Amino acid sequence: FSISCDECSSEADCNYHGSCSVNTKQCECDDGWIGTSCVLDEPCEVIVDEYYEYQFSLLRDDNDGHLVMVYDRPVYFAEDAFSDGTIVVIYTGRRWYDVYAEISIEDFILMFNDFFHGYWNAIFEFSTDYFSEPTGKSSPVGLEMNQLISFAGDFGAYGDTVKTDRSFHCMEGTCDRCDYDVGGTRECIKNQCICDSGCGEDGYFYNFTGYFCHIYAPSDTICSSSGLNGEEQV
């Protein structure tokens, strides 16, 4: 193999998805593309974890607003609702990791901007519970996540793992994913599903939660023939 300077000299070096800056010798990507060579799709601003119902936003540097990039990929973050820690979804060169640490997002930004390396920064010393299969995708959207059950030891570098139903989805186009399969209507406001509740055809009161109204909250309440408390059945 060979090693060369990370500089561009023409639009071809930017995959014709951007222009090569004369001053910096770096690609300036067109809208819709990111990466050193403008070869990766522009990521969603916000992704949703359906399993835990966390909403992750793109991590940007507070100083100038630029995307914080690791291995030519964006970083997503969410503040943990149950602690003072931060959850980040980060690419480590081959896989996407879900990492939790009791440090501020500002400290994460400093670490990622300071020549971050998945191994040398000992990313496993943080609480890493989920990771994807090997991939080159520009974001974790649509990838199946594995859960780490037992750390390393007799189970190899990634411990004892199991496949899960956990996955990430773009918030864009959320209205298209509101679940209308069961009785009732789901309203969509500003790309957010507004979940419905009421008396279903089975005679029981139902309630739906989750970003896509996909989580059914069962109830033992039985509706009358005219509905719950006089409410008409849907």
Image: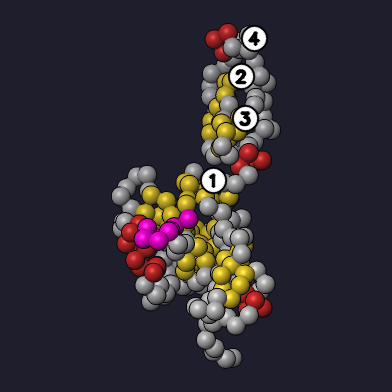
Amino acid bearing label 3: Arg
Viewer can see residue 85: yes
Residue count near mark 2 (Cα–Cα under 10 Å), binned few <14, some 14–19, many ≥20? many
Q: CA distance from mark 2 to mark 4?
A: 10 Å
The residue sitting at 47% across, 51% down in the picture is 56
User: Secondary structure under badge 4?
Assistant: loop
Q: Which residue is mark 2?
A: 199
Q: Which residue is mark 3?
A: 186
Front label number (1 vs 3):
3
Please, is residue 197 above or below residue 21 in the view? above
Viewer can see residue 90: no
- Bounds of the magenta segment: 58-65
Residue 120 at x, y percent in the picture: 38, 76
User: Secondary structure under badge 3?
Assistant: loop
Residue count near mark 4 (Cα–Cα under 10 Å), binned few <14, some 14–19, many ≥20? few
Prevalent SS, magenta region = loop
The residue sitting at 52% across, 50% down in the picture is 46
The residue sitting at 39% across, 68% down in the picture is 112
